[in-house]
Image (cartoon, coloured by chain):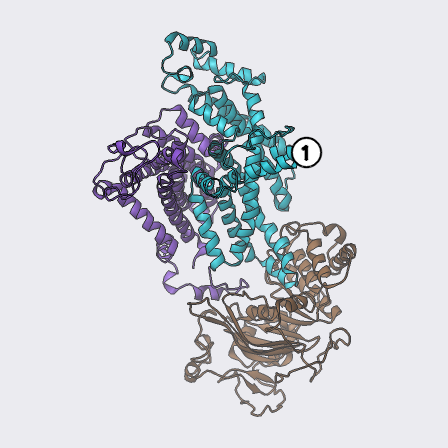
Amino acid sequence: MIRFVLRRLALMVPVLLGLSILLFIWVRSLPGEGPARSLLGTRATPERIEAINEQYGFNDPLLEQYLRYVGSLLRGDFLSSIRDGKPVLDTFFDKLPVTVELSLAALLFAIVVGIPLGYVAARYQGRAPDTAVVSGSLLGVATPVFFLALLLKLVFANWLGWLPATFRQTPGIDATQVTGFAVLDGLLTREYDAAWDAVLHLLLPAIALGTIPLAIIVRITRASVAEVLQEDYVRTAESKGLRRRTVARRHVLRNAMLPVSTTIGLQVGLLFSGAVLTETVFSFQGIGSYLFQAISQRDYPVLQGYIIFIAIMYSLINLVVDLLYGVIDPRVRVST
Amino acid sequence: MTPAGPSAGDDALDLVATPADERGTSLWRGAFRRLRRNPSAIIGAAIMLVFVLVAIFAPLLTSFRPGTGEFFGQVTPSSVPGPSQEHWLGLDTGGSDMWTQLLYGARQSLVYGVASTLVGLTAGAALGVLAGGFGAVGGRVGGWVDTAVMRVVDILLSIPSLLLAVSIAAIITQDSLAIIIAIGAAQVPIFARLLRSSMLAQGKSDYVLAAGALGFRKRRIVMSHILPNAIGPTIVQATLNLATATLEVAALSYLGLGPDDPRVAEWGRMLVNAQSRFDADPRLAILPGICIVVTALGFTLFGEALRESLDPRSRR
Amino acid sequence: MSPPSHQHGADVLTDGRADRTPVQGDQPLLSVQDLSVEFGLRGQKRVRAVDSVSFDIRPGEHVGLVGESGSGKSVTSLAIMGLLPRRGAHVSGRITYEGRDLLTASRAEMSQLRGNDIAMVFQDPMTSLNPVVPIGTQLAEVVTRHRRLSKSEARDRAGDLLARVGIPDPRRRLKEYPHQLSGGMRQRVLIAIALACEPRLLIADEPTTALDVTIQAQVLEVLKELVAETEAALLMITHDLGVVAGLCDRVNVMYSGRIVESTTRSVLFGEPRHPYTGGLLRSIPRLDAPRGEPLVAIPGSPTNTLPWTQGCAFAPRCAHVQDDCRTDPPALLEHGPRMLRCHHPLDGSDGPTPGGGSAGARPTAAGVADESAYRRPTEEDA
């Protein structure tokens, strides 16, 4: 078990190293005028641009720049943003709770709604509930995240006025920060009104971000349950006279969850991608919207740092998913 | 699926349930026959057909040109003229005829979608064949090549695909080719892994072992036995990826990384431009949004139906 | 075959279990009357898998249901258990268990009955156990469902059951998963599950077919012992007359969804009258056969049938086929000690006995052999 984890962690090293090289080359080899121009605007004097380039070492040979970059990474220095001068590491971890909270809410929505819907669709395969669920999930996959986000905002915030349209919390609300997770903070400090406020703000973005994972989870669950329902061991369970609930939980869903759990792990990447769009639409100050600003202004250190962090998190999450997989499926339990 | 026949050894039932004309026909011919009977395949194919026709014959369907902004004078900060006799879907924020913009937008989506999927498919399939072919042949060199290629793919896979496309698009300038490469590159890992795993699976099957035992050359086994049998899922994935590519072009536009030539009509950018007026005039955003959804839905429906029809377990 | 008898009210659920040897005139435990099962979703042509099948099982009696795959024997067993798919399966006829009609029973009633009164052992032990649940749980859950036992009591009982089916170190095995057991061991577990609540009727659907030949005899022996111990009635479904020979009191031979011959074991093995039964018997090795005598296979495959509505389904493969076999569907009629569905039975000296006469078994030339000659060697013999 421990050896398995260590081996997986060791495998991440070359992947990340390769990623850093790749990113570095991509980022530096761009044609155009680099960050100094987008930072200083079109009317900047050549001298000012030169000064910036000199300051950040953009004039040195690529290899030298790369080695210097890796050297600083190994020292734990992830450089600072060119734009606002803040250390990349700090802003990342400052903003992480926002994105994680949003992603978890989206994933929760996708799982809690998706698995029962998929199960129902499989049970009623080929009949009306199935057709409805499948059509809905196809529509969900085909709708761009930001379009859905805009529609939700229009209907529920602007027209109906039920839910807030932007920000994580009502501006000016007096909420104490502890962990950075707004809902959790509200609960911890017993500021329940603040927690509720955060939940309300989270609803629309979570639904917008969670819809594609929801559609995917529904379809995988449906296919998986339909397959398990045909299995001999389900018939054995029924031949024992077990209650329907027991058959569904212990025998059908436990087996059907195997492919679903892998899928849920894969959704994490989708959530990070979607967070960039969702956070922008709903004005959340998370990793996604910060990364978006970094992209549009060619903020190299932020771009490089954030993508490497996201890749690390993505790999770690998939490792955890694989370990969880072993918990549900004794056959792949890692013995090495 | 057989008519819910019990699996308890009653194979005869399965046989009876399969129409006689379907036994023993080739995989693809059988798949095509099943496709023709699947309503969602027909809907998907119809959408795809309309989409392609509109993209090709856009100039014949409207008397205006896209992206000219020739009616910009009628657009005021507070309102964009809605449907009228002359412009039956109204104008867009840039002062062009909405109907024309939407028609020409199909063109962009088709070009970007197909081209980027082709890029991703070609590069991904090449990597996949390399890894899968060598992996299936096995041996020390084979295993090494397989591992090396898959490490590269792992690197690409460690970045969420939209972020990959975004970072590439941010880096290389925003011309059409760059966008195509960005979205295509993001698809490479999917194709590479899919093709590799189905080639490895085929490599273990009995007929490949038999071909090896008969002394066929390894390259011939890979190229003329394993590859043709393993390519099915990859083709299905390509159909599905047309939908993803359409959505990602729109997403890039939304992030300001899409095609930046204002004379080019593109649904994603129309949506973005309409965003500030979304509340007052939802038509401006909803129309291009619907175009994106319907197109992606068409590709998805058809791709899913194709996947189902190729899957022997779901035969009806 | 006794005429269908309807039993009402007589409740013999708990005490007074019938003696092991079936007694004539006993009320049947299970009575299947005119059972037909058709498959086909709406709009599709229906396929008839079971066609007017009738037979009785008395308490403690061992009944064989013999036929090739596709003959409808497994579907019959699933119909009794109420485990046919709800969609696409159309069942008609009557199945009564102790006077209760199983086909009209509610889902709750059926689930009370399954595992407790009627239990089943399935064909493939590799796929019939849940791969992600420890076998101890899979055993204990049937006990806790039907008996008032605490969790630890159920576990103890599960351990005892494993020991009884001959699994060494049962306490430790309880925590193991199916993939850690061999096929033979898994089938023992399934037998333990089926007999955990001491059902009155056990249905065994080809319980040894999927096992290695060397294991088959052992597993069959375990099954036999436990059935004897719990005094359960047994419906043994098999394509192997060798299994029937050592086990069953009565045998029903099915072909293409219908019963073609039905009688006691000794009569059937002594003088098979249906050409299909004869073919089955000639195709299995006999202990008393002279060395070098070839086994005879039945020509053709079970899919090559005639619809029963047009004639005899076995006609295309029958060595004794005559013209009327292809045009006139034979009826299941009483021929002396047996029910037979054939126009031209083997050694057709005795015709149908109208009015249900009780003609004794007559020795015929067809092969006066004791059924023991066909029996599979078991552990006892070794």
Q: Looking at the colours in the rendered structure, which chain would you say is drawn in brown? A: C
The answer to whether residue C380 is visible is no
Q: Say which of B128 and B32 sits in front.
A: B32
Residue at image location 59% in from the left, 90% down from the top: C356
Decide: is C244 above or below B194.
Answer: below
Residue ranking furthest to the top: A47
Q: Say above or below: B238 vs C137.
A: above
Give residue B168's quadrant in the image. Answer: top left
Give the image location of residue A327, x and y in percent: 64, 43
**Chain that bears disc 1:** A
Q: Which residue is mark 1?
A: A188
Where is residue C107? Give x, y as percent.
62, 67
Closer to us: A295 or C200: A295
Q: Nearer the viewer, residue B251 or B220?
A: B251
Q: Residues within 10 Å of mark 1 (few under 14, many from 20)?
A: some
Q: Is residue A199 left or right of residue B160?
A: right
Which chain, by letter, is purple?
B
> What's the amino acid at mark 1?
Leu
Q: Position of residue A181 (x, y in %)?
A: 61, 32
* The C terminus of chain B, quarter of image: bottom left
- Asked whether residue A255 is in view, the answer is yes
Q: In the picture, which chain is cyan?
A: A
